[in-house]
Image (cartoon, helix red, strand yellow):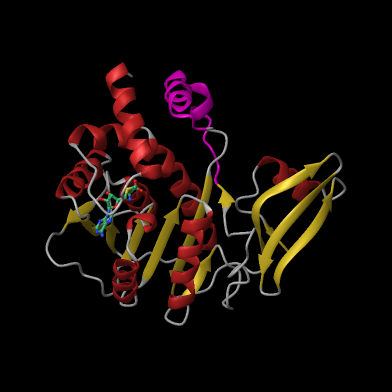
Amino acid sequence: MTAKEIKQLKELREILLNGDLTRDYWSPERLRLYHVTLGERIGWKWDSVLRELEALGVQWPRHVIDWGCGSGVASVRVTRAVGGPISHQAFDRNPLCEAMTRENLRAAATNVTFETGALKWDGALVVLSHVISELTPVALQSLVKDLKRTAMVIWVEPGEKRSSERLLGVREELRGHFSVVAPCTHQKACPLAGQSSAWCHQFAEVPSIAFQDRAWSEWAKWLGIDLRSLPVSYLVLGAEGGASGARVIGRPRLRGGHALVTSCGAEGLKLDTVTKADKPVFQALKENPFRLILK
Ligand SMILES: C[S@@+](CC[C@H](N)C(=O)[O-])C[C@H]1O[C@@H](n2cnc3c(N)ncnc32)[C@H](O)[C@@H]1O
């Protein structure tokens, strides 16, 4: 990566973290750089979420809308998981993003027919990714109204508290219209609502390329990103419920021979101690508890 590209990436990251996100910030060069760096890292979060949904055996709708598509990271991951043929609509306030999303889908050789024009919400699978912090309350409200017409929603956000809380608000508004498929293991009100120090987030799996490819460690160092940690908050709504049990929240605290784990299920939030004697669970907690459900 050239010095100029690093500078551009740093500028973009600064906007994404601290800028006025109600205004457009893309240029063709920024979007291209984003797609192969920050965007690809977001793709890893999608891979973890989609693996979980595949394990749950969800039925995929055949029309996909990527709302706030950016460079199309979510579209590429989801269309691969769904398999063709599907119809697809890219939507973004910047038309450059819609064009690049279609280009990236074509390059990924997915079996997709592209549609333009008014969004076909009815019966659609709507994917949303890292967009909630850019929406005003009014824009979010209007979007939630449209989502009520769809068949399935997969929404992935960065895993920080504010985005997670807004996503929780979406869950509470939509759970009467859909079943909550994941990460929740129940359909009741979210027990994390109003919590001051806890919020719904997990840590997605990081692929080995992140540690094997020098280019990854270099740009991550320049941007101050710790590639080992991939926090994510997500919400999947659909026709049928998901797993039962209690989902691990946040990062387990490992203390020598045992781990302290916060989990969330139909009975609310729980703090458990898992000892080394429970080998498979302890091992999963140590390695990556993203898909771990405690019984
Ligand atoms: C951080 S980017 C994420 C892009 C992509 N979803 C991803 O995960 O890589 C947020 C995207 O949302 C778009 N966006 C923000 N507010 C929007 C709105 N009100 N309507 C449509 N798109 C919007 C931005 O233009 C930008 O492409």
Q: Say if the magenta span includes residue 223.
A: yes
Q: Which residues are magenta?
A: 204-225
Task: Give yes or no for residue 127 being in the magenta stretch.
Answer: no
- Which residue occupies the foreground of this view, 158 or 100? 158
Is 294 positioned to the left or the right of 176 in the image? right
Q: Where 264 sits versus 251, above or below?
A: below
Residue under the image location 58 percent in, 59 percent down: 200
Q: Is residue 2 visible?
A: no
- How far across and how far down the image is residue 258, in percent? 84, 46
- Front residue (pair 282, 142): 142
* Snapshot quadrant of residue 41: top left
Q: Is residue 22 above or below residue 270?
A: above
Identity of the residue drawn at 53% across and 37% down = 206
Q: How many marks?
A: 0
At 21% from the left and 70% from the top, the residue drawn is: 120
Residue 236, position as x, y percentages in the image: 46, 64
Q: Residue furthest left?
A: 117
| Quadrant in which the C terminus appears | bottom right
Please name the predominant secondary structure of the magenta segment in the image: helix
- Name the foreground residue: 281 vs 8: 8
Image check: 159 left or right of 264? Answer: left
Left/right placement of residue 177 relative to residue 95 reads right
Quarter of the N terminus within the rendering: top left
Residue 153, position as x, y percentages in the image: 39, 66
Can residue 87 be seen from the camera position used here?
A: yes
Judged left or right of residue 293, residue 10 is left
Q: Nearer the viewer, residue 239 or 232?
A: 232
Q: Position of residue 104 (x, y in %)?
A: 24, 41
